[in-house]
Image (cartoon, rainbow, N blue to C red):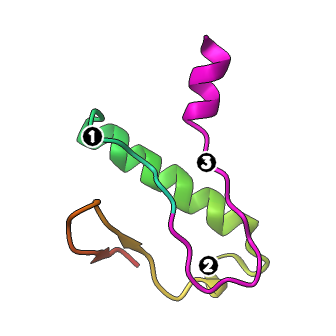
Amino acid sequence: ASQIDEIKASIKFQLKKVLCMGVAVANVGMSEAEIRTNIMYAVNFLVSLLKKNWQNVRCLYIKSSMGKPVRIF
């Protein structure tokens, strides 16, 4: 059961020749602190996969399913 929960909670980044990427990092049942932590981990991990790290990131947005996107970088 713990392996199933771990796989459900994992994120898979597929870095190809795409300029835009969307990733689910939270769900409705999570607290604000958990969502904030997940966003930080996801962004830092994604940046670590890039060749020039932050130099390859132009901007970052967070968005809820029905809300407007908010630029964070």
Q: Which mark is residue 11?
A: 3
Q: Residue at 61% across / 48% down in the picture?
A: 11
Q: Quadrant of the N terminus?
A: top right
Coordinates of residue 72 in the picture (x, y in percent): 35, 74
Q: Which residue occupies the extreme front position in the image? A: 66
Q: Nearer the viewer, mark 3 or mark 2?
A: 3
Task: Give the distance between the C-alpha atoms of the residues marked 3 and 1, in whole angstroms.
Answer: 17 Å
The kind of residue tagged 1 is Val
Coordinates of residue 9 in the picture (x, y in percent): 55, 35
In the rendered structure, which segment of residues is drawn in magenta?
1-22
Crowd rating for badge 2 (residues with CA inside 10 Å; few <14, some 14–19, many 20+): few
Crowd rating for badge 1 (residues with CA inside 10 Å; few <14, some 14–19, many 20+): few
40 in relation to 3, above or below: below
Dot placed on the residue nearer the N-terminal end, 1 or 2: 1
Contact check, label 3 and label 2, Cβ < 8 Å: no
55 in relation to 49, above or below: below
The kind of residue tagged 2 is Trp
20 in relation to 15, above or below: below
Coordinates of residue 68 in the picture (x, y in percent): 21, 74
